[in-house]
């Protein structure tokens, strides 16, 4: 019997990574498509899968791990539709419209939930009952899994937009979030760093006080994740987290802010095992999209 092939889509704010994969995760074809607008991106995506099908065989299911906000409630009539995204052209765009011609089942979740799933199955989250995955890049996003299932309420979580303590004397930057100004994303995502210092955290040669400032904002999310979800581990990925010294500063700031309140074997001294970077590196997203596709198969 031939494999039932999976179409996997990691839909990011800058680019889509699209892949045709076997259920075991083997990637048969892969491409990158600029996100731009649905009018250019969706036809290019469909064209990739048409060509991949012609070469490798019928696609049985699609797994989509996407930027948002997006409707990820399978019971909703708008499942798979972008909602209030400020990204021009994307509000109202729907994956089912772009992929309907293939007649395959489609599972849609957020990019961070997808990455969390990838890490839970094959990366740094392996063995965790509750796992939180955060990306700090062009934005800040959080996904929480329990037993490999992403948690949500009436919509997916928006942990990147929590309010954080902001000392305007130490850090006069007003924040860039169009909704909240100085929410976590508004203060600590890549664009905030660039707007504040004119360069990325790593380009700046990583002065310790800059790293400490950003680490302390992110630590406030880490503390809230512990308090609200008691995860077995926290994974922090994304472009900003690649800054040398940042994860170490984040561990220190989180431990200081937790202030010894939570006593549990999961919280090792120094949080070296508790707060980690992705085991799959940049492959977490597409691995998660393939995992979502695998779920669509079953
Ligand atoms: Zn915000």
Image (cartoon, rainbow, N blue to C red):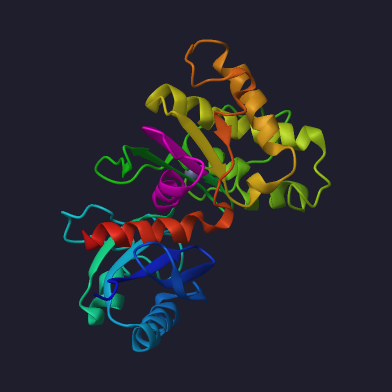
Residue 78 shown left or right of residue 146 in the figure: left
- Which residue is more in the foreground, 236 or 224? 236
Question: Residue 209: x percent and y percent?
Answer: 79, 32
Residue 47 shown left or right of residue 238 in the figure: left
Question: Residue 87: x percent and y percent?
Answer: 46, 64
Q: Could you tell me which quadrant the N terminus lies in?
A: bottom left
Q: Kindly identify the residue that appears in the image at 56 percent across and 41 percent down.
A: 236
- Which residue is more in the foreground, 30 or 142? 30
Q: Is residue 210 above or below residue 20?
A: above
Q: Kindly identify the residue that appears in the image at 35 percent across and 86 percent down.
A: 50
Q: Is residue 84 visible?
A: no
- Which residue is more in the foreground, 296 or 36? 296
Q: Report which quarter residue 131 is drawn in.
A: top left
The span shown in magenta is 113-134
Reply yes or no: does residue 18 show up in magenta: no
Q: Is residue 241 above or below residue 292?
A: above
Q: Is residue 122 visible?
A: yes
Q: Is residue 256 above or below residue 27?
A: above
Question: Residue 230: x percent and y percent?
Answer: 41, 24
Residue 245 shown left or right of residue 118 in the figure: right
């Amino acid at each position: 019997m031939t494999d039932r092939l999976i179409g996997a889509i990691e839909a990011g704010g800058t680019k889509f990574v699209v892949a045709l994969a076997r259920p075991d995760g083997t990637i048969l074809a892969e491409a990158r498509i600029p996100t731009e607008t649905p009018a250019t991106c969706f036809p290019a995506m469909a064209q990739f899968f048409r060509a991949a099908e012609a070469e490798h065989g019928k696609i049985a299911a699609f797994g989509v791990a996407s930027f948002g906000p997006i409707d990820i409630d399978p019971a909703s009539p708008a499942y798979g539709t972008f909602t209030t995204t400020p990204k021009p052209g994307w509000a109202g765009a729907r994956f089912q419209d772009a992929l309907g011609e293939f007649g395959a089942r489609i599972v849609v979740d957020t990019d961070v939930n997808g990455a969390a799933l990838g890490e839970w199955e094959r990366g740094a989250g392996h063995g965790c009952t509750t796992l939180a995955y955060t990306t700090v890049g062009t934005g800040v996003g959080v996904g929480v899994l329990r037993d490999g299932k992403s948690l949500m309420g009436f919509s997916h979580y928006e942990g990147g937009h929590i309010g954080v303590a902001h000392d305007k004397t130490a850090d006069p930057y007003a924040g860039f979030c169009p909704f909240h100004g100085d929410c976590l994303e508004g203060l600590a995502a890549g664009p905030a760093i660039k707007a504040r210092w004119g360069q990325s955290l790593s380009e700046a040669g990583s002065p310790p006080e800059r790293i400490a400032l950003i680490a302390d904002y992110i630590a406030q999310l880490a503390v809230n994740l512990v308090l609200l979800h008691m995860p077995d581990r926290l994974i922090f990925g994304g472009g900003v987290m690649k800054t040398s010294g940042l994860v170490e500063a984040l561990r220190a700031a989180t431990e200081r802010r937790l202030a010894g309140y939570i006593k549990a074997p999961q919280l090792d001294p120094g949080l070296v095992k508790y707060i980690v970077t992705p085991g799959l590196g940049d492959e977490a997203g597409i691995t998660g999209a393939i995992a979502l596709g695998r779920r669509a198969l079953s």
